[in-house]
Amino acid sequence: MKKIAVFTSGGDAPGMNACIRAVVRTGIYHQIEVMGILNGYEGMIDNAFVSMNEKSVSNIIQRGGTILKTARSQRFLQPEGRKKAIENLKAHQIEGIVAIGGDGTFRGALALSEQCHIPVIGCPGTIDNDLVGTDFTIGYDTAINTVIEAVDKIRDTAESHNRLFVVEVMGRDAGLIALRSGIGAGAEAILIPELKSDMNEMLDKLEKGRKDKSSKIILVAEGDESGGAYKVMDAIKQKFGSTYDIRVSVLGHIQRGGSPSCIERVNASRMGHAAVKALLQGRSNVMVGIINGCITHTPFEKAVKHIVEIKADLKELAEILSI
Ligand code: ATP
Protein backbone atom coordinates (compact mmCIF):
# COMPACT_ATOMS: atom_id res chain seq x y z
CA MET A 1 0.00 0.00 0.00
CA LYS A 2 1.51 3.28 -1.13
CA LYS A 3 -1.12 5.92 -0.60
CA ILE A 4 -4.05 6.31 1.81
CA ALA A 5 -6.58 9.02 2.67
CA VAL A 6 -8.07 10.10 5.99
CA PHE A 7 -11.19 12.19 6.67
CA THR A 8 -13.55 13.19 9.47
CA SER A 9 -17.32 13.10 8.99
CA GLY A 10 -20.61 13.68 10.83
CA GLY A 11 -20.55 15.62 14.09
CA ASP A 12 -17.13 16.80 15.26
CA ALA A 13 -15.71 15.40 18.48
CA PRO A 14 -12.71 16.30 20.68
CA GLY A 15 -9.90 13.84 19.98
CA MET A 16 -10.46 13.67 16.21
CA ASN A 17 -7.25 15.68 15.71
CA ALA A 18 -5.26 13.22 17.83
CA CYS A 19 -6.61 10.41 15.65
CA ILE A 20 -5.74 12.23 12.39
CA ARG A 21 -2.23 12.85 13.73
CA ALA A 22 -1.80 9.15 14.53
CA VAL A 23 -3.01 8.08 11.08
CA VAL A 24 -0.64 10.50 9.31
CA ARG A 25 2.40 9.66 11.40
CA THR A 26 1.80 5.91 11.37
CA GLY A 27 1.41 6.08 7.60
CA ILE A 28 4.67 8.00 7.22
CA TYR A 29 6.40 5.52 9.56
CA HIS A 30 5.40 2.75 7.13
CA GLN A 31 6.47 4.79 4.05
CA ILE A 32 2.88 5.38 3.01
CA GLU A 33 1.82 8.70 1.52
CA VAL A 34 -1.17 10.20 3.35
CA MET A 35 -3.76 12.60 1.97
CA GLY A 36 -6.41 14.39 3.99
CA ILE A 37 -9.90 14.89 2.58
CA LEU A 38 -11.57 18.12 3.75
CA ASN A 39 -15.24 18.30 4.81
CA GLY A 40 -15.95 14.58 4.97
CA TYR A 41 -17.85 13.02 2.07
CA GLU A 42 -18.57 16.50 0.68
CA GLY A 43 -14.85 17.02 0.08
CA MET A 44 -14.53 13.54 -1.43
CA ILE A 45 -17.11 14.61 -4.05
CA ASP A 46 -15.62 18.11 -4.49
CA ASN A 47 -12.05 16.82 -4.88
CA ALA A 48 -10.85 18.60 -1.72
CA PHE A 49 -7.77 16.39 -1.19
CA VAL A 50 -4.67 17.77 0.54
CA SER A 51 -1.24 16.20 0.99
CA MET A 52 -0.22 15.67 4.58
CA ASN A 53 3.17 15.25 6.19
CA GLU A 54 4.47 14.91 9.74
CA LYS A 55 4.46 18.69 10.12
CA SER A 56 0.86 19.20 9.01
CA VAL A 57 -0.27 17.42 12.18
CA SER A 58 2.10 19.25 14.54
CA ASN A 59 0.60 20.93 17.57
CA ILE A 60 -2.92 19.55 17.10
CA ILE A 61 -3.14 16.70 19.65
CA GLN A 62 -4.46 19.13 22.29
CA ARG A 63 -6.98 20.87 20.04
CA GLY A 64 -10.72 20.13 19.89
CA GLY A 65 -12.63 20.04 16.61
CA THR A 66 -11.01 18.66 13.48
CA ILE A 67 -8.37 20.30 11.28
CA LEU A 68 -9.83 18.41 8.30
CA LYS A 69 -13.26 20.00 8.95
CA THR A 70 -16.38 17.89 8.86
CA ALA A 71 -19.75 17.91 7.15
CA ARG A 72 -22.95 16.01 6.56
CA SER A 73 -23.38 15.29 2.86
CA GLN A 74 -26.75 14.89 1.16
CA ARG A 75 -25.06 14.31 -2.20
CA PHE A 76 -23.16 11.27 -0.90
CA LEU A 77 -26.48 9.58 -0.11
CA GLN A 78 -27.08 9.35 -3.88
CA PRO A 79 -25.20 6.84 -6.13
CA GLU A 80 -24.24 9.73 -8.43
CA GLY A 81 -22.49 11.57 -5.58
CA ARG A 82 -20.63 8.42 -4.60
CA LYS A 83 -19.62 7.84 -8.24
CA LYS A 84 -17.98 11.28 -8.34
CA ALA A 85 -16.25 10.59 -5.01
CA ILE A 86 -14.86 7.30 -6.33
CA GLU A 87 -13.56 8.99 -9.47
CA ASN A 88 -11.63 11.42 -7.28
CA LEU A 89 -10.28 8.65 -5.03
CA LYS A 90 -9.06 6.78 -8.09
CA ALA A 91 -7.56 9.91 -9.67
CA HIS A 92 -5.48 10.39 -6.51
CA GLN A 93 -4.54 6.67 -6.52
CA ILE A 94 -5.90 6.15 -3.03
CA GLU A 95 -5.47 2.50 -1.99
CA GLY A 96 -6.97 2.65 1.50
CA ILE A 97 -9.15 5.01 3.55
CA VAL A 98 -9.45 5.82 7.26
CA ALA A 99 -12.90 7.25 8.08
CA ILE A 100 -13.28 8.95 11.46
CA GLY A 101 -16.94 9.42 12.38
CA GLY A 102 -20.12 7.87 13.71
CA ASP A 103 -22.64 5.31 12.49
CA GLY A 104 -23.71 7.44 9.49
CA THR A 105 -20.10 7.71 8.34
CA PHE A 106 -19.73 3.92 8.46
CA ARG A 107 -23.05 3.44 6.60
CA GLY A 108 -21.56 5.73 3.98
CA ALA A 109 -18.43 3.58 3.86
CA LEU A 110 -20.56 0.47 3.32
CA ALA A 111 -22.40 2.20 0.48
CA LEU A 112 -19.03 3.19 -1.00
CA SER A 113 -17.82 -0.41 -0.87
CA GLU A 114 -20.80 -1.48 -3.03
CA GLN A 115 -19.45 0.70 -5.84
CA CYS A 116 -15.67 0.28 -5.45
CA HIS A 117 -13.07 -1.95 -3.80
CA ILE A 118 -10.92 0.54 -1.91
CA PRO A 119 -10.64 -0.79 1.67
CA VAL A 120 -12.05 1.44 4.41
CA ILE A 121 -11.24 1.27 8.14
CA GLY A 122 -13.34 3.26 10.61
CA CYS A 123 -12.33 5.01 13.81
CA PRO A 124 -15.29 5.71 16.13
CA GLY A 125 -15.52 9.50 16.37
CA THR A 126 -18.69 10.66 18.08
CA ILE A 127 -19.42 12.15 21.49
CA ASP A 128 -22.46 9.86 21.91
CA ASN A 129 -20.60 6.58 22.60
CA ASP A 130 -23.36 4.79 20.69
CA LEU A 131 -21.32 2.36 18.58
CA VAL A 132 -21.10 -1.37 19.14
CA GLY A 133 -17.51 -2.66 19.26
CA THR A 134 -15.77 -0.15 21.51
CA ASP A 135 -16.00 0.79 25.17
CA PHE A 136 -15.41 4.46 24.40
CA THR A 137 -15.79 6.49 21.23
CA ILE A 138 -13.51 9.44 20.47
CA GLY A 139 -15.05 12.54 22.06
CA TYR A 140 -17.17 10.88 24.71
CA ASP A 141 -14.80 11.22 27.67
CA THR A 142 -14.17 14.91 26.99
CA ALA A 143 -17.90 15.57 26.48
CA ILE A 144 -18.91 14.00 29.80
CA ASN A 145 -16.16 15.94 31.57
CA THR A 146 -17.47 19.15 29.99
CA VAL A 147 -20.97 18.28 31.19
CA ILE A 148 -19.97 17.61 34.79
CA GLU A 149 -17.96 20.83 34.89
CA ALA A 150 -21.04 22.77 33.71
CA VAL A 151 -23.40 20.94 36.06
CA ASP A 152 -21.07 21.57 39.01
CA LYS A 153 -21.37 25.28 38.27
CA ILE A 154 -25.14 25.05 37.93
CA ARG A 155 -25.23 23.23 41.27
CA ASP A 156 -23.53 26.19 42.99
CA THR A 157 -26.20 28.62 41.89
CA ALA A 158 -29.04 26.10 42.38
CA GLU A 159 -27.89 25.51 45.95
CA SER A 160 -27.68 29.24 46.71
CA HIS A 161 -31.21 29.92 45.46
CA ASN A 162 -32.86 26.64 46.52
CA ARG A 163 -33.71 25.88 42.90
CA LEU A 164 -34.46 22.84 40.80
CA PHE A 165 -32.59 22.81 37.49
CA VAL A 166 -33.50 20.69 34.51
CA VAL A 167 -30.31 20.37 32.44
CA GLU A 168 -30.53 19.07 28.87
CA VAL A 169 -27.51 17.33 27.37
CA MET A 170 -26.76 15.93 23.91
CA GLY A 171 -27.92 12.45 22.91
CA ARG A 172 -30.58 12.17 20.19
CA ASP A 173 -30.71 8.38 20.37
CA ALA A 174 -28.36 7.52 23.20
CA GLY A 175 -28.49 8.49 26.86
CA LEU A 176 -24.95 7.56 27.83
CA ILE A 177 -23.77 11.18 28.15
CA ALA A 178 -26.69 11.92 30.50
CA LEU A 179 -26.29 8.73 32.50
CA ARG A 180 -22.55 8.88 33.14
CA SER A 181 -22.33 12.61 33.71
CA GLY A 182 -25.47 12.42 35.85
CA ILE A 183 -23.76 9.92 38.13
CA GLY A 184 -20.56 11.98 38.06
CA ALA A 185 -22.34 15.21 38.96
CA GLY A 186 -24.66 13.65 41.55
CA ALA A 187 -27.91 14.41 39.69
CA GLU A 188 -31.17 13.71 41.54
CA ALA A 189 -32.74 12.14 38.43
CA ILE A 190 -31.59 11.17 34.91
CA LEU A 191 -33.94 10.81 31.93
CA ILE A 192 -32.63 8.88 28.90
CA PRO A 193 -34.20 7.53 25.69
CA GLU A 194 -33.31 3.93 26.49
CA LEU A 195 -35.51 3.83 29.61
CA LYS A 196 -39.14 4.40 28.73
CA SER A 197 -40.87 4.98 32.07
CA ASP A 198 -38.33 7.34 33.60
CA MET A 199 -40.50 10.51 33.51
CA ASN A 200 -43.14 9.00 35.82
CA GLU A 201 -40.43 7.53 38.03
CA MET A 202 -38.83 10.97 38.29
CA LEU A 203 -42.12 12.65 39.27
CA ASP A 204 -42.74 9.91 41.80
CA LYS A 205 -39.29 10.39 43.20
CA LEU A 206 -39.82 14.13 43.61
CA GLU A 207 -43.04 13.39 45.49
CA LYS A 208 -41.61 10.78 47.83
CA GLY A 209 -38.03 12.02 48.03
CA ARG A 210 -36.29 14.09 50.66
CA LYS A 211 -37.74 17.54 51.13
CA ASP A 212 -34.69 18.94 52.91
CA LYS A 213 -32.51 19.14 49.80
CA SER A 214 -31.87 22.75 48.91
CA SER A 215 -31.10 22.03 45.24
CA LYS A 216 -32.07 19.41 42.74
CA ILE A 217 -30.58 18.64 39.33
CA ILE A 218 -32.48 16.62 36.75
CA LEU A 219 -30.43 15.61 33.73
CA VAL A 220 -32.32 14.89 30.52
CA ALA A 221 -30.93 13.60 27.21
CA GLU A 222 -32.23 15.60 24.25
CA GLY A 223 -33.74 12.46 22.66
CA ASP A 224 -35.61 11.34 25.76
CA GLU A 225 -39.28 10.58 25.12
CA SER A 226 -40.26 13.36 27.55
CA GLY A 227 -39.45 15.80 24.72
CA GLY A 228 -36.56 17.60 26.42
CA ALA A 229 -35.87 19.94 29.33
CA TYR A 230 -38.74 22.40 28.79
CA LYS A 231 -41.29 19.58 28.63
CA VAL A 232 -39.86 18.10 31.82
CA MET A 233 -40.18 21.50 33.51
CA ASP A 234 -43.84 21.73 32.36
CA ALA A 235 -44.59 18.27 33.75
CA ILE A 236 -43.07 19.16 37.14
CA LYS A 237 -45.02 22.43 37.26
CA GLN A 238 -48.21 20.63 36.33
CA LYS A 239 -47.82 18.13 39.13
CA PHE A 240 -46.31 20.29 41.87
CA GLY A 241 -47.48 23.81 41.02
CA SER A 242 -45.13 26.39 42.54
CA THR A 243 -43.48 23.97 45.00
CA TYR A 244 -40.22 24.21 43.05
CA ASP A 245 -38.43 27.27 41.73
CA ILE A 246 -37.42 25.73 38.39
CA ARG A 247 -34.88 26.78 35.80
CA VAL A 248 -33.83 25.12 32.55
CA SER A 249 -30.33 25.00 31.11
CA VAL A 250 -29.69 23.49 27.67
CA LEU A 251 -25.95 22.89 27.44
CA GLY A 252 -25.86 22.60 23.63
CA HIS A 253 -22.72 22.79 21.55
CA ILE A 254 -20.23 23.46 24.34
CA GLN A 255 -20.37 19.66 24.76
CA ARG A 256 -18.65 19.20 21.40
CA GLY A 257 -15.75 21.56 21.90
CA GLY A 258 -12.72 21.89 24.11
CA SER A 259 -9.34 20.36 24.59
CA PRO A 260 -9.54 16.53 24.63
CA SER A 261 -8.91 14.75 27.94
CA CYS A 262 -5.76 12.67 28.34
CA ILE A 263 -7.67 9.40 27.98
CA GLU A 264 -9.22 10.74 24.78
CA ARG A 265 -5.85 11.66 23.27
CA VAL A 266 -4.37 8.27 24.07
CA ASN A 267 -7.39 6.27 22.86
CA ALA A 268 -7.69 8.34 19.67
CA SER A 269 -3.96 7.89 18.99
CA ARG A 270 -4.22 4.14 19.55
CA MET A 271 -7.20 3.86 17.23
CA GLY A 272 -5.62 5.97 14.45
CA HIS A 273 -2.48 3.85 14.63
CA ALA A 274 -4.52 0.62 14.65
CA ALA A 275 -6.53 1.77 11.62
CA VAL A 276 -3.41 2.10 9.47
CA LYS A 277 -2.15 -1.26 10.72
CA ALA A 278 -5.52 -2.81 9.83
CA LEU A 279 -5.18 -1.48 6.27
CA LEU A 280 -1.68 -2.96 6.08
CA GLN A 281 -3.07 -6.31 7.31
CA GLY A 282 -5.53 -6.28 4.41
CA ARG A 283 -8.65 -5.62 6.47
CA SER A 284 -11.63 -3.67 5.15
CA ASN A 285 -15.05 -2.41 6.27
CA VAL A 286 -14.26 -2.76 9.96
CA MET A 287 -14.24 -0.25 12.79
CA VAL A 288 -11.33 -0.33 15.19
CA GLY A 289 -12.26 0.00 18.82
CA ILE A 290 -10.95 -0.57 22.33
CA ILE A 291 -12.62 -3.19 24.50
CA ASN A 292 -11.21 -3.98 27.94
CA GLY A 293 -8.07 -2.09 26.98
CA CYS A 294 -7.40 -4.09 23.81
CA ILE A 295 -7.71 -3.06 20.15
CA THR A 296 -10.62 -4.76 18.39
CA HIS A 297 -12.06 -4.86 14.85
CA THR A 298 -15.83 -4.87 14.37
CA PRO A 299 -17.56 -5.12 10.96
CA PHE A 300 -19.35 -1.87 10.09
CA GLU A 301 -22.67 -3.72 9.78
CA LYS A 302 -22.42 -4.68 13.46
CA ALA A 303 -20.92 -1.41 14.73
CA VAL A 304 -23.86 0.70 13.51
CA LYS A 305 -26.58 -1.42 15.09
CA HIS A 306 -27.33 0.96 17.98
CA ILE A 307 -27.74 -1.82 20.50
CA VAL A 308 -25.41 -0.39 23.10
CA GLU A 309 -26.81 -1.66 26.36
CA ILE A 310 -27.38 0.53 29.36
CA LYS A 311 -25.61 -1.35 32.10
CA ALA A 312 -28.07 -2.23 34.87
CA ASP A 313 -25.47 -1.51 37.54
CA LEU A 314 -25.08 2.11 36.35
CA LYS A 315 -28.83 2.66 36.50
CA GLU A 316 -28.95 1.10 39.97
CA LEU A 317 -25.98 3.20 41.08
CA ALA A 318 -27.70 6.40 39.91
CA GLU A 319 -30.85 5.42 41.83
CA ILE A 320 -29.11 4.49 45.07
CA LEU A 321 -26.79 7.50 45.21
CA SER A 322 -29.43 10.11 44.43
CA ILE A 323 -31.53 9.68 47.59
P1 ATP B 1 -22.58 11.62 14.56
O1 ATP B 1 -22.73 10.37 15.38
O2 ATP B 1 -21.70 12.61 15.20
O3 ATP B 1 -23.90 12.18 14.07
P2 ATP B 1 -22.32 10.35 11.99
O4 ATP B 1 -21.15 9.79 11.27
O5 ATP B 1 -23.36 9.36 12.44
O6 ATP B 1 -21.76 11.20 13.21
P3 ATP B 1 -24.12 11.37 9.97
O7 ATP B 1 -24.47 12.75 9.58
O8 ATP B 1 -25.23 10.45 10.36
O9 ATP B 1 -23.00 11.49 11.09
O10 ATP B 1 -23.35 10.66 8.74
C1 ATP B 1 -22.28 11.32 8.10
C2 ATP B 1 -22.46 11.25 6.61
O11 ATP B 1 -22.38 9.90 6.16
C3 ATP B 1 -23.81 11.72 6.09
O12 ATP B 1 -23.91 13.14 6.00
C4 ATP B 1 -23.88 11.06 4.73
O13 ATP B 1 -23.18 11.81 3.76
C5 ATP B 1 -23.14 9.75 4.97
N1 ATP B 1 -24.11 8.65 5.11
C6 ATP B 1 -24.86 8.36 6.19
N2 ATP B 1 -25.67 7.31 5.95
C7 ATP B 1 -25.44 6.95 4.66
C8 ATP B 1 -25.95 5.93 3.80
N3 ATP B 1 -26.89 5.07 4.21
N4 ATP B 1 -25.47 5.86 2.54
C9 ATP B 1 -24.52 6.71 2.10
N5 ATP B 1 -23.98 7.68 2.86
C10 ATP B 1 -24.43 7.80 4.12
Image: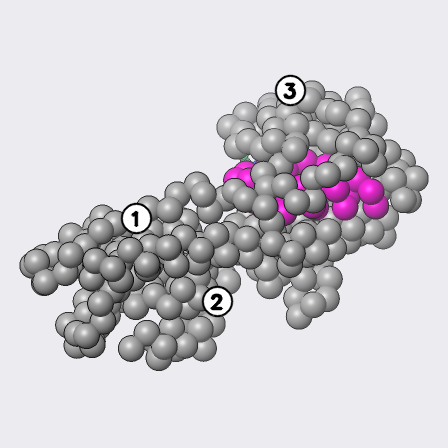
Among the two numbered marks 3 and 2 on one chain, the one whose residue lies closer to the N terminus:
3
The reply to whether discs 1 and 3 touch (Cβ–Cβ < 8 Å) is: no
Asked if 274 appears above or below 1 in the picture, the reply is below
Residue 122 x, y percent position in the rendering: 68, 47
Q: Residue at coordinates 70% horizontally, 56% vertically from top-left?
A: 266
- Ligand 1 within 8 Å of the CB at mark 1: no
| Amino acid under disc 3 | Asp
Residue marked by disc 2: 309
| Amino acid under disc 2 | Glu
Q: Is residue 226 left or right of residue 270?
A: left
Helix, strand or loop status at disc 2: loop
Mark number displayed over residue 249: 1
What's the distance in space between the residues labelled 1 and 2, CA to CA?
A: 27 Å
Mark number displayed over residue 163: none
Helix, strand or loop status at disc 1: strand
Q: Nearer the viewer, residue 284 or 265?
A: 265
- For this orientation, the residue located farthest to the bottom is 320
Q: Residue at coordinates 77% horizontally, 32% vertically from top-left?
A: 56
Residue 300 x, y percent position in the rendering: 63, 51
| Amino acid under disc 1 | Ser
Q: Give the quadrant of residue 119.
A: top right
Helix, strand or loop status at disc 3: helix
Q: Residue at coordinates 75% horizontally, 25% vertically from top-left?
A: 50
What's the distance in space between the residues labelled 1 and 3, CA to CA?
A: 39 Å
Q: Nearer the viewer, mark 1 or mark 3?
A: 1
Res 120 seen here = no
Q: Residues within 10 Å of mark 3 (few under 14, many from 20)?
A: some
Residue stretch in magenta: 4-26
- For this orientation, the residue located farthest to the left is 241
Q: Residues within 10 Å of mark 2 (few under 14, many from 20)?
A: few
